[in-house]
Image (cartoon, helix red, strand yellow):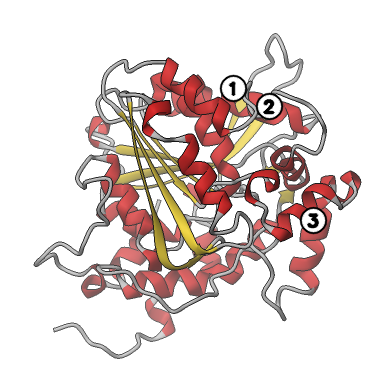
Amino acid sequence: MTSQTEPPRSAFPDPKEYLDDPRFHQTFTLPPGPTRPHSFTVSYSDYGYRNKEHPELERVLLLCGPLLGSRYLHIAKDALAKHHRVRIIDVDRPGFGGTSGVPSPGDRVAAWLEIVPALLSHLGVRHVSVAAHSGGTIYALNVALRLRHLLHPERPYVALCAPWVRPARSGAPLMSLAGAVLPEGLVGGFDKVAAFVNRNIAPAVRVSGSLVPSLGGKAVLAPGVDGKMVEFEERLWGPLIDRVYSESVKGLGQDSVLLLKRDGKNGDWGGWEDYDDYVPMLAAEGVAAGKLRVEVFFAESDVMIGVGAGPKWIEECWRAEVRGDGIEFASRVVPGSDHDTIAHIRFGVFEEIFRGMSGEDDVETPPAAAAGMASVAAEQPAPLREGVAV
């Protein structure tokens, strides 16, 4: 019988030792090419389930993080990913961590579309599912459109958590201010503002996830979620964010300009201007094999895209007569979550994503805890300690 008492702190890995795990500090170098005279360094995390003898049994998830596009944000999900036999690859976007920067916001999507296939080829990964949070949506959707051959041929799958919506569409007051009032120089220098906030303000007050993502919010625990994993993620979060800001976050300013479309350029999102342009383009690609499944998870509370016009805009763009027969779409609101926290373990979204990758669950029904399934908590702290080993 599993003890209900709180485990001692020693039952969890030391945050510094965990963050130093070599799996979270991988690098890859792109050689100079026709459009790039210099080599380009990419830093990434590669963790979760591995089967080196039979790599074809690995289900690989490519993560596209939020505005703070760091490879560290989901590393607490290592044990959860192993439990579901999912391998996670999380790449620092240009200007984050050890990834080289690009000259302008308009170069970011093109760089991403060069990085992803080169890195996956380097790792010997043929197919992936894709998941994104907030601003990472733009990058994930470009993978689905421009690199469709990298999605699983039988179970192509894309999951979007609190997907980004432009202020002109969402009407969200906070983002409308940033989109129309703040000087472009301030938006472009967002990385400096965020670093200052993390050093001087965030320890004392809770700030929007655009600057310093938080684990705050309602104390919701979704059915079947392991409380020990939730506790581990929460204990790790502060040191994790400090580690993010100890490395480069210069890409934060460029991503802010890109998402808000403040540079006045068209095509920076990958040749499409908004989701109403994107979905018909994706539908026109047809279905090479399996029907593409797109799942969207909206937050119950969301200061970044709102809970009215923003989600409604997304659903309108993906309506059946636009997406056609080759795309299956579903969306739902995640109880108790907000824009910052929706991707955290306690809300169960990533368990749904892991199951959705394999087609185990109906896309419109959140998974319940499997009857009789042994709790991962009963084996703690071993699964968490397992995550520290290479």
Q: CA distance from mark 2 to mark 1?
A: 10 Å
Residue 382: quarter of image:
bottom left
Q: In x, y percent, where is residue 268?
A: 70, 27
Query: Given contact means CB atoms under 8 Å apart, are the residues at marks 3 and 1 in contact?
Result: no
**Disc 1: CA contacts within 10 A as few (<14), some (14-19) or many (>=20):** few
Tell me the kind of residue under disc 3. Leu
Tell me the kind of residue under disc 2. Phe
What residue does disc 2 label?
A: 40
Looking at the image, is 25 positioned above or below residue 373? above
What residue does disc 1 label?
A: 114
Q: In x, y percent, where is residue 74?
A: 48, 55
Query: Residue, x 46% and y 22% (percent of image)?
Result: 282
Looking at the image, is 240 positioned above or below residue 323? below
Res. 122 in view: no
The numbered mark, 3 or 1, whose residue comes first in the sequence reads 1
Would residue 220 be found to the left or right of residue 185 on screen? left
Q: Nearer the viewer, residue 241 or 225?
A: 225
Local SS, label 3: helix
Query: Given contact means CB atoms under 8 Å apart, are the residues at marks 2 and 1 in contact?
Result: yes
Looking at the image, is 63 positioned above or below residue 227? above
What residue does disc 3 label?
A: 177
Res. 83 in view: yes
Q: Nearer the viewer, residue 34 or 300?
A: 300
The numbered mark, 2 or 1, whose residue comes first in the sequence reads 2
Q: Nearer the viewer, residue 38 or 274?
A: 274
The numbered mark, 2 or 3, whose residue comes first in the sequence reads 2
Would residue 111 be found to the left or right of residue 151 on screen? right
Q: CA distance from mark 3 to mark 1?
A: 33 Å
Query: Residue, x 51% and y 35% (percent of image)?
Result: 140
